[in-house]
Amino acid sequence: MRMRQAVLKALDDAMAADGNVVLMGEDIGEAGGAFKCTEGLIGKFGRDRVIDTPISEMGFMGAAVGAAICGLKPVVEMMFIEFAGVALDQLTTEAATMRYLSRGRLTVPMVMRASAGAGQGFACQHSQMLDHWFRGTPGLKVCVPSGARTAYGLLRSAIDDPDPVIVLEPRILYGEREEFDGDPAYRIALGSAEVARMGRDVTLVTAGAMLRVALAAAEQTNADVEVIDLLSLAPWDRKTVAASAARTGRLITLEEAPAGTGWGGEVVAAVTSDAFGSLKAAPHRITLPDAPIPYSGALEKRYLPDPEYVAAQIDALVSSGRAPAAWWKEAS
Amino acid sequence: MTLANFNAPVARREALESRREQLVRMMEIRAVEDRIQRLYSEGEIRGSTHLANGQEAVAVGIARVTRPDDVVTCTYRGHGHALALGATPLQVIAEICGREAGAAGGVGGSMHLMEPSVGLLPTFAIVGAGLPVACGAALAARTRGTDNIAIAIFGDGSTNIGAFHESMNFAAIRKLPMLFVCENNLYGEYTRIDKSTPVSDLAVRAASYAMPSAIVDGQDIDAVADAVAQAVARARSGGGPTFIEMKTYRYSGHSRSDPATYRPAGELAEWQKRDPIDILAARLASEGTIAAGEAADLRAATAAAVEEATKDALASAHPSQDAILSHVTGASPGEDNRWNFWSKSTSSGRPTATPTSATR
């Protein structure tokens, strides 16, 4: 099934299983969602559970927080993750601290799922991942699926979770197909990564839409690459990554994020501490440049890491033991 | 003779059926605010505090006509509301002093008082943040088929922030069972309303959301209670939200460091002539509910009780370091992941704990 269908099925199954699950967002009812992830749900569950909101992100995000405190399990759809900017207070200041300030007497079992990421020419205000807005806030959890199966498993776990969870769905993957039987019991525990490909020479840690790039790059290199799909960015699976890096002796992160904000900074720091004695080379991060995402197809193609670029970076690290320069450093 | 009879928050709330207890509660709020001011100068209080002396009638008036299972969101000027709704003086004073006996065990402080057993969510330290949350509580009440309502309490300063307008619009189109109660005390932080806001009656803003509204003398508890009771009845019966503007005044500056020198000379004295406690005390004396001269005795007894609570608060321990890591997420050490109020009966199952969650 396509990732979009997996998201829809996860919402459908969760709503059928628990009458407290409600959906909120712009154009999710009659219109079925901007990316058709809620198509048909309003007919099945009605207007009180599939709530079309005004274009008022702060308002409906806060309403989701309040509804979650009071016993519902709201799943908010944020059409583009950038739109959460005008609603950030409700997630990072209110939802994130409710359990703490109430000493566990109140919890906020809500989910915000958002389309995110680059590659389709939506330009700089509709193409970011922005996970760093959330994973730096204690009290919030953040995950990123990489296809239909993980979209289903993570979203069901997010809805089950007693705390606010942000699910960043790579928009570019909505139409992509993956073998998945849609078992309603299927879950992926938040905070656990998957080894997507076994290898002996280097550990390549990635997430979201970059998984496809990582797997393709692994086929093109001379090295035997182990690819880890992080899946959750907060909390993240330090144990799995550190164990892999200790085994292969090399660590590379492939992040769809500007260097200054990517999750790889934390992953590299932690794994270096955990596995320093086993590392044969300095850890290396493959990121986006610290610049807005360009519109032009030619520019966006250059801006995003592709398999050829990633493979060359891997080969350079493995053969020389030194971290290669990023393309924008080479060019300057 | 007064406070000692009602130690539990719910009992304190229910006690407000008594007119005499309403007066005592207003006196208690005043005494606590005065004591907080002194505790600050005694070095027992960190950060900031925002006093609401002068606004007692609004707090007690709302509390007397709403139920403990209604949800209240309130601003950081919330000491009075917490006490009115039922939190005890010990809970409030100890929290503001950062002690274990505090409402939030000392992790929240002045701006984050809470008592869920009487509906009070942790008070919101971001202007306007509580309004959307109240909408959600009202939405949950209706979706779950209960007759609970939500009450958003906020200041005049909030009515210029986006969250206010988004919430008013959302509540109106969904006909949510809730109240928007604006305490218009004329000042948003250090700025007078006429310098920040082009209208002086904020209730006119409700009209653009086709929402019924009222302007109320916030210094008269009976006027407050009447207006709130009408709005509560409308909300509980499916009639949708109401906006109520309480005309009131804070005797203190914005926060503990603000001497409020920006106020016109004589303005404070004018408002103090219509002190909400004096108004109710005179009315109860003329009705015969209290004896002539009894108000002074009640005031003295209340102040003594607050002094007792202060002693207990200062005798309470500083929180242990366990408090730092507890209740961050469901995976925090010792977390019990209990489900929320209103949800226990109908939730089809408890949430799945994350694999890393520990149990004590």
Image (spheres, rainbow, N blue to C red):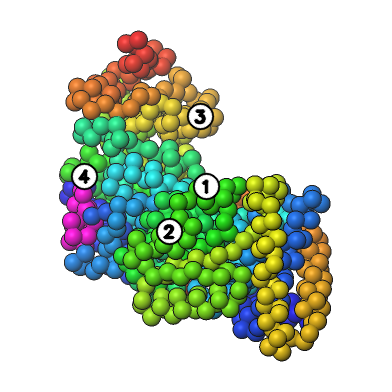
- Disc 3 vs disc 1: which is toward the camera? 1
Q: Which residue is mark 1?
A: B195
Q: Which residue is mark 2?
A: B132
Q: Amino acid at mark 3?
A: Ala
What residue span does the magenta drawing correspond to? A28-41
Q: How far apart in space, not on screen, are marks 2 and 1 (Cα)?
A: 26 Å
Q: Is residue A29 magenta?
A: yes
User: Which labelled disc corresponds to residue A269?
Assistant: 3
As helix, strand or loop, the secondary structure at mark 4 comes to loop
Which chain is home to disc 3? A
Q: Is residue B9 magenta?
A: no
Residue A314 percent location from the top left of the image: 33, 20
User: Which labelled disc corresponds to residue A50?
Assistant: none
Residue B163 percent location from the top left of the image: 42, 53
Residue A60 located left or right of residue B360 = left
| Residues under numbered marks 3 and 4 in contact, where contact means CB atoms less than 8 Å apart | no
- Disc 2 vs disc 1: which is toward the camera? 1
Residue B74 percent location from the top left of the image: 54, 61
Residue A47 located left or right of residue B54 = left
| Sequence-first tag of 2 and 1 | 2
| Residues under numbered marks 4 and 1 in contact, where contact means CB atoms less than 8 Å apart | no
- Disc 3 vs disc 2: which is toward the camera? 2
